Amino acid sequence: MLDDVNLKAKLSKADFKKAKEAFEQKLPQLQRDLRGAGIPVIVVFEGWHAAGVGTAIGRILRCLDPRGYSLHNFQEPDEEEALRPPMWRFWVSLPSNGEIAVYDGSWYSPAMEADAHEREEIAERARVFERQLVDDGAVLVKFWMHVSQQEQARRFSKMQEKADLSWRVTKEDWRENQHYAENAKAIDKVLKETSTPEAPWTVIPSHDSRYANLRAIETLMDAMERALKHKRPKQAKKAAKKAVKKARRGSSPLDKVDLDVTIERERYDRQLSRLQKRLLRLEHQMYLPRIPVVVMYEGWDAGGKGGNIKRLIGGLDHRGVRVIPVAAPEGDEKTHHYLWRFWKHLPKAGHLTVFDRSWYGRVLVERVEGFARPEEWQRAYQEIREFEKQLTSFGTVLVKFWIHISKKEQLKRFTLRQNTPYKQWKITDEDWRNRERWDQYYEAVSDMIEKTSTRNAPWTIIEGNQKLYARIKALKTVCAAVDAALDAARHGDKRYWR
């Protein structure tokens, strides 16, 4: 891609002035139109040092309403960022629907210093990230600002001659210039591998700043106009409900669960105390190798998630534990990609986070109730597998529980709640309404388990008709998972001891 760039491209001052009068009116209008349409815009600037990235960004932002954009400058991860998966800091910085985010440095920046294997990982993460954002309706525009080795050296020298700019040129910058050909080859490979139909790269020759700035602005405006022209209409809820009614092929993993298993109270009390103490020891041990742990609960209404979570964390040092209750998205959560709110709550390495319901709402309640279009929840299986792969590749211990109870047991618990004054707050009309759709949820849960139980992130189905048994099984499962990670850390797993 870089070899095809015409670095001699220029624009006269008169031609730029004429174009400037047009884009200074058009770009703000597009910003307003996109805000009204609820379409987020993500603009990525990468390029050689001294290639004019800052100038191009400034030219764009001066045209925009500052209340509707954010500018992000990403350098090396700081301590807080390094304790989470690589894409965490980019997910949490994403713009709300209708907002614009400009990135000076991005998820591509580490590729410059990476070896071939690391570059492949960076490219794969980028492709996944960008596809998910574009599929969700975002406008994504990516620029590489390009200059020759000679031009870069000339600019470095010129900056060093000025007292107020000399600090901006470092030894690392000159080293980059000295190894320009080698770096260009690696960069060209990354650009080719990550220039996809949904997120293509635009390589801008930047020897002439007027030409470079106008090319960036016109490319951005074209992308905005296409997004407004092709904005997808919301489909009726009936479409999603109709899709759920398709008959399943084969048996469900839930069909094989033995819900009659129990444990005696005396044995339960002994094991609960022993397992809680064991998990506390593991919590202390996982801190030094910086092992993050995510325990995620899904299950039927009245399945016993709350009591199970209470026993799971009951013996822990709560300074290293968070419980995230997940309900219907509200506020900012409704104006971002559905995975955004879960990325935001991922634990630091060395800490434990429990999600009481999770990202699987996309393929459960949103599927059954028609809150997501069929194409949205159908592609969510892949998006979720990719999300969880990024967590476990970082070293996160990910434990996924489905607490399973029978329809008869659920009715028994609903009735008890309704007839017990201090438990009545736990039962709502929505619970009864959801129960009427038991068969639809049963099918959705079955699909969820079959399509997202992977080697790196398997589902554990917990027999939940007896709450005592369910609590012990959950504790045993989490202890075993953390134990395995600690053993891997002791044997030199490179994901740990950060």
Image (cartoon, rainbow, N blue to C red):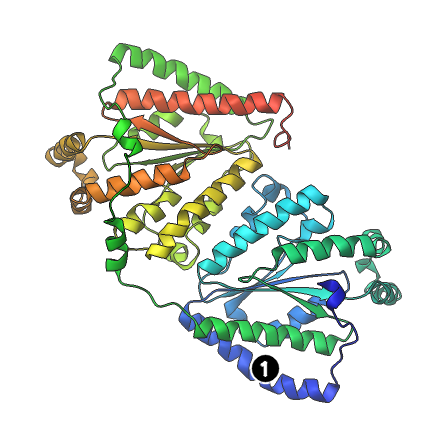
The amino acid sitting under disc 1 is Phe
Q: Is residue 467 left or right of residue 309?
A: left
Q: Which residue is mark 1?
A: 23
Residue 67 visible in the snapshot: yes
Residue in front for this viewpoint, 269 or 10: 10
**Vertical order, 23 against 105 (above or below):** below
Q: Residue furthest left?
A: 419
Q: Which of the 4 image quadrants contains residue 410?
A: top left
- Tell which of 458 and 416 is nearer to you: 458
Which residue shows up at 82% across the image and 58% down it? Answer: 169
Q: Quadrant of residue 216?
A: bottom right
In the picture, the quarter occupied by the N terminus is: bottom right
Q: Is residue 315 above or below residue 413?
A: above
Q: Can you give x and y, in whole percent of width and height, for residue 320 in the image?
A: 49, 31
* SS at badge 1: helix
Note whether residue 105 is visible. no
Q: Indicate left or right for 72 with 373 as reference.
A: right
Q: From what the image shows, is residue 412 above or below residue 491?
A: below
Horizontal relation, residue 38 to residue 19: left or right: left
Decide: is 472 above or below 34.
above
